[in-house]
Image: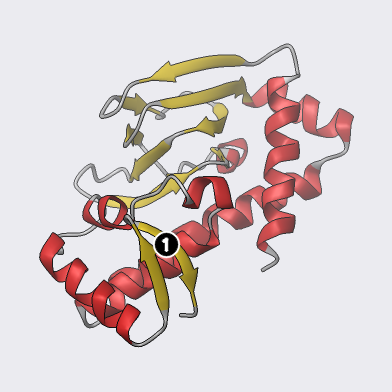
Amino acid sequence: MDERAIEAAIQRVGKAIEDSGKSFLFNYKARQRIDLKNKNNIYFLKSGSVAAHSYNEKILTCNILVPEVIGIESLRGMGMFKFLRCITDVELVAISNTDAVELFTALNIWRDVNDCCLSLLNVYLRKEHKFNQSTSRGTIIEYMKHIWTLSPSQRNSTSIYTFILARTHISRSLIHKVVSALEDEGLIIVRRGILVKCKL
């Protein structure tokens, strides 16, 4: 998957939603819950990150980072997520399904909308792959690979330790041990918790 092309598509759809004149900007604080059930909205995650939970509230489906468009499947009466839990402070731009359909049709950006769906599917599949690792080292490596795919500005403000600790039950000491081993193997370089080089 061409991640740069996908991210460009997400940005185009997000900007279209923001500039539509029919959207609303919501600000949420870290740990705040955002209910999605029966909302019939599409959301552009403009800033921050959220944990998406399925209809079984005990199950964390995946963590979603900016930029992302959430809720497109609701156009067909489906719902992937019951609610979002803010990991950080979040800016979310919402538009109703009815207005979204009119907007996407008028701007002829349904191909970009499809790419947004693929992006969210990829987020979910990556999460499944991470949690199917047989060792903590394998899980840490998968998260490091994911961090490396972030934009430079996001990557340079993301502590690998905070990122992995927030998403796993792996101890900080074990993360440090694995990171040190990967550095010794010449596979990564980490400076003050920031991943600056990755050959994984």
Q: Is residue 125 visible?
A: no
| Nearer to me, 47 or 102 | 47
At x 48%, y 52%, the residue is 155
73 lies left or right of 32: right
| Nearer to me, 46 or 176 | 176
Amino acid type indicated by mark 1: Leu
41 lies left or right of 87: right
Residue positioned most to the bottom: 185
At x 79%, y 25%, the residue is 102
Q: Which residue is mark 1?
A: 195
Q: Quadrant of the N terminus?
A: bottom right
- Position above or below: 165 against 56: below
Q: Is residue 8 visible?
A: yes
Question: How many numbered discs?
Answer: 1
Q: Position of residue 137 (x, y in %)?
A: 25, 78
Q: Position of residue 90 (x, y in %)?
A: 43, 27
- Position above or below: 98 against 68: above
57 lies left or right of 11: left
- Position above or below: 194 against 113: below
At x 72%, y 29%, the residue is 15
121 lies left or right of 188: right
